[in-house]
Amino acid sequence: MNAAGGAEAATPLDARPGPREREPYLRISNLWKAFGDFVALRDVSLEIEQGEFVCFLGPSGCGKTTLLRAIAGLDPQSRGTIEQAGVDISTLPASRRDYGIVFQSYALFPNLTVRDNIAFGLENTRRPRREIDARVAELLQLVGLPEQARKYPTQLSGGQQQRIALARAIAIKPGLLLLDEPLSALDAKVRVHLRHEIKELQRKLGVTTIMVTHDQEEALSMADRIVVMNHGVIEQVGTPTEVYRHPATLFVADFVGETNKFESVLRDGNVRIGDVALQASTGAIAEGKPVTVAVRPEDILPHPAAHADDGQPNVFRVQIEDMEFLGSYWRTHLRAAALRGAPLVSNFSMNAVRRLGLETGREISVELPAERVLVFPREG
Amino acid sequence: MDGTQIAMPPGKAVRLRVDRDGAIKRLFMVVIGLYLVIALALPLYAMMSRSLVTYSFDLTRYEFQVSDEAGNWGEPVSAAELNARLGRFAPTDLRTNTNGRLSATDFFPDFSFRSPVKYRLRGTTDNAPWLVGLDLKNTTAWQEYDSNTFRRVNLRPVASQGLQNYAEYFSNPALFSSIENSIFIATVSTVLTVVLAFGFAYAINRSCMPFKGSFRLVAMMPILVPSLLPGIALIYLFGNQGMLKEMLGGQSIYGPLGIVIGSVFFTFPHAFIIISTALSLADQRQYEAAESLRASKWRTFWIVTIPGARYGLISAAFVTFTLVITDFGLPKVIGGQYNVLAIDIYKQVIGQQNFEMGAVVSMILLIPAVVAFAVDRQMQKKQVSLLSARSVPFEPRPNRRFEMFCLAWCGAIAVFIMGIILVCQYAALVKFWPYDLSLSLNNYDFNRMDGGGWASYWNSIEMAALTAVIGTVVVFTGAYMVEKVDGFAAGRNVFQFLAMLPMAIPGMVLGLAYIFFFNNPANPLNAIYGTMAILVVSTVTHFYTVGHLTALTALKQIDAEFEPVASSLRQPFYRLFARVTVPVCLPAILDISIYLFVNAMTTVSAVVFLYSTQTTLASIAVLNMDDAGDIAPAAAMGMMIFYTNAVARILHAVVTRRVLVRTQAWRRR
C-alpha cells in the first residue's frame, strides 16, 4: 500500500547532507510513557544529528527500549512529540515512519531464504525483479555474506543471521536505523567482531543510527554519543570519553566503568575521607553538603614506598592486600590506615607493577589526582 | 535527578493515527468478533432470557359481552369474573407455554354453536391477544362473533418474567431425578475412564512395552465415530437378542450400565491424550534422585509420578465428566427409561415443544460444564509452568514382568475398543440379526430407510468440509488477531473470552440457543434457519475453542517482532500473514481443519435441533434409524462415518508430511 511511496520518500543515501547540520535529524521533546501506574519515561528530551551513531545505555527497566519503541511507533508515547527530518511523526503508525529495525532475536522469517528475507521490503513496490536481485546481491556483499542467498536462516550462525537482519533493515534505505540490543544474543568473540563491522557499515552508509544496549563496553566502543538512562530519565548525554571521564551523576559514574565510592561532606573545597583530605573538582556543590566521592580504579596512581611526594595533597600510604592478575592489568585491593580501613580497588598496569615491584603485603604510596576525584551531591 | 519527581502533564494519551493496515486489522477483528457475538453470545442470551419467561392466560385482560337470542346485548363482563363465577380454572391451570390456547367457549357452559346468540370480545389492555381460527387479534375495540365463529376463538397467553420455570423444574421429581442420574453416570464413567486411560498412558510413556504405536492408534479410534455408536454395539452384544447377553447375568444393558460402558469408550481418547501429555513431561533426574534415596518403586510412584501428573489427571477427569454429562447420543440409544439432563432437553423440546423448560434444563446443564471448564483452564496454566522447566526426558528401563503387565492392560483396552468397532461392522454386514447371519451390503442401502438416506451422508460430507474450511479460516484469523494485533486491548480481551466460551457450552445447549435466536421471525438472520449454513455455523462455534487454542499455541511460538519488522519495511500485515505466518503455522492449521472435519462428521448434539429435511446428516441418521428400530442400518451409517474419518485422518497425515517437506524445508537444518 504505502510501501512504494514510503520507499521513494526515504532520502537517497548519497543526497543526504553531512553530519552536524544545524537542524537535528531527530528531535524528541518532553516524552512521557506510562504503563498503568508505572512511568517508564519521564519528560525525556533529546536531539540527534544527521548521521550520528547514538547509544541508549542503561540497566534493564531504565526506559531505553521504551524510548526506542516510541521512536519506532511500536508503543506510542503517552505525552510529548517526536520529529524526524523536520516532520512531526508523533502520531504516525510504524508503517508510515522512515526507519529500519534490527531486534535481538533477529526476527528473520524462518520459512524464507536469505534472499527472500532481504527482498521482503523491496518486493511489492513495483520494482523489477532484476533490480531487486541486484540490490540483494549488493547488500549481501555489504554485510560480507555474498554466497548465502539461497540458505534458510536456521542454516546460518547467529552472527550471520544478525548480519542478514541488518541487510534486510537497510535494504529499503531508511533514514533511521534502530538496533535493539542487536548483539546480546551472540558469543563474546562474535560480538566484538560484529561491533566493529556494524560501526563500519554505519559510517559507510552515513545512516543515523540508534542502538539500545545495556553493555557499556559496546556503547563506549561504537557510539558517537551515549545517552545514559536510568528510571525513565536521561542522566547524561555525551561522547564516550565525556561520559567516562566526566560522568554527570553518580549513577553514570557507577554504571559506566567502575568506581570506589566514599561518603563525605564538602569542607573548604576539600572532601575528607577518614584522615585524608582530598582536593577534588567539586563544581557547583555548596559548602557543607553531604557528598559521595568516586574514584575510578585506574585513576589511582602507585608510587614506590616512601615516595618524595609523601605529605603532598591527595597522596597517602596504603597496604597491598591482594592482587588479581587479569591479563592486561592487575586488579589490586588496597587498604589504607588513613582511610580508617575503607577498602580501595585499583587497576595497576603490568608495567607499573613490574617497575615498582608491587606485591601483596607491600606498603606503598598512592596518588589520587585532584581532577580525577569525582564528587557528587548525596541525597537525604 | 530522582529528587525532581514531577508528575506527567495532564491530557490525553498520544494515539497513533490508524493507517489502512490498522483499519483492515480492526475490520477483520470486528468481523470475526461479530461472528462470535452472533453465533454464540446472542443465542445464549436469547436462551437465558427465554428460561425466565413464563406464559399464562391473564383473564383480567379480556371482556365479553353476550346477547340474548333476540340480539339484545347484556352487560360487559370480564373473563376473570366469569371464571370466578364458574370456578372453571384454578390459577395453576392458567399457566401454559408459548403454544397455549384457551377456548373462549369454556367460559360459557351453555354455549352451542348453532344458537343465534352473539358474542363480543375485547381486550382491556393493549396486550390481550386471542385467535380467531389462525388470525391473531389484539385490540381494545369490541369484536363481534356469531356462535359458529365464536367456537373458534382461543385466548392466547401473555409472557411475564420470573423464576417460575425453575421453581417448577425443581418441584418436579421426575425431572429432578435426572440431575442425580446425570451426576451418577458422569462420576462412575469418569473414575473408570481416568483409571483405564492412566494405565494405558503410563504403559506407553513409562515402559519398554512393544507395539506402542499401534496401541496409540487404537486409543484414538473412538474419536472417529459418533458417541452413540458404542451404544449400538452394546445392544448387539448385550441387548435383548445380544450375542453375550448371558454374561450380564440378568442385568439389563439398557440404562446406566450401557451408558457407562459406552461413555468409557468415547471419552477414552480425550482422557488418554491429556494424561499422556502430562506423563510425557517426566524428569529423569527426579527418578534418579528417588532411586539414590532408596525409595521403593511403589513409593516413587506415589511421591514422584502421581504429583507430576496430577494436573493432567484432574484436567482429564473434568473433561471426561463434562463430555459424559453433556452427551446426548448414548443415553438416547441405550439409556432405556433412564433419564439424564441431556435427554430431558431433547424430550422437552422435541417431544413436548416446551421450549422454556428446555431452556431451564440447558441452564442447569451449563453449571457442571462451566465449572469443569474453569477448573480445566486453571490446571492447564499450571501444567504449562511445569513444562517450562528444563528437564532431562525420562528413559524407561526394560523390566520384563512390568512389560507383560502393561501389555495385558493395554491389550484388554485395545480389545474393548476394537471389539466395539468390529461388532458395529459385523452388525452392519449381517443380513438380519439374529435370524439370518449371512453377510450382505443391504444395510448400506440407506435410501430404503428413514433418516434421509444416502443424501444424509453426502450432506454430512458437505457440512464437514465446509466446517473444516470456513472454521479453519475463521479460527486461525481470529487467533491471529488476538495474538498479533497491537492496541485495541479491550476488544481483544472480549474476543479471547468469547473464543474460550464454546468449550463450556454443551452442544445441546448451543443447539437450543440457536433455535431461540435464529428461529425468531424478527431476527434478520432468520433466513439461515433450516439451511446448511446454520449447521456449519453451529458446528464451527461448538468446536471453536480447541482450534483457537491450537492456533494460539502455534502463533505464540512465532517471534513477536515479525510484525514490527514488516511494518518498518512498510509491508502490509496481510503480506506478512500470507508469506510467513500461515506457512510457518501450516501444520497447526491442518490440525485445526482435521479436528473440525472429524468432529463435524460425528457431532449430534448441537445439530439435532437444527437440521431440516433438506439437511439431514449422517450422524443424525444413525440416531433416527436407531430410533425407528433400524439398528443394523444405523450401525452401517455409523461405520460410514468411521471410514470417512479414517480416510480423512490418513489424508491429513499424508498432506501434512508433504506440506512439511515442500514448504517447511527451513525446518531441516
Image: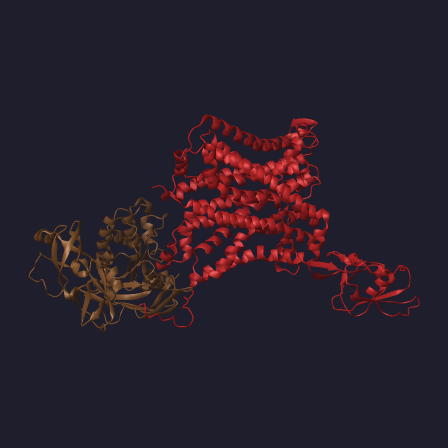
Say left or right for A354 vs B144.
Answer: left
Q: In the current view of this chain or complex, which residue is farthest to the left?
A: A308
At 49% from the left edge and 32% from the top edge, which residue is drawn?
B214
Q: Kindly indicate which chain is depicted in brown in the rendered structure.
A: A
At 91% from the left edge and 70% from the top edge, which residue is drawn?
B72
Q: Does residue B650 lie above or below B91 as drawn?
A: above
Q: In the current view of this chain or complex, which residue is farthest to the right?
A: B70
**Quarter the C terminus of chain B occupies:** top left
Image position, residue A335 (x, y; %): 18, 56
Task: State whether residue B637 appears in this view.
Answer: no
Residue closer to the observer: B518 or A283: A283
Say left or right for B619 vs A335.
Answer: right
> Image quadrant of residue B234?
top right
Image position, residue A89 (x, y; %): 35, 68
Residue closer to the observer: B169 or A164: B169
Number of numbered markers: 0
> Image quadrant of residue B193?
top right
At 21% from the left edge and 54% from the top edge, which residue is drawn?
A196
Image position, residue A348 (x, y; %): 14, 54
Image position, residue A179 (x, y; %): 30, 58
Task: State whether residue B222 appears in this view.
Answer: yes
**Quarter the N terminus of chain B occupies:** bottom left
- Coloring basis for residues: by chain
Q: Chain B is drawn in which colour?
A: red
Q: Does residue A286 lie above or below A13 as drawn?
A: below
Say left or right for B488 vs B38.
Answer: left
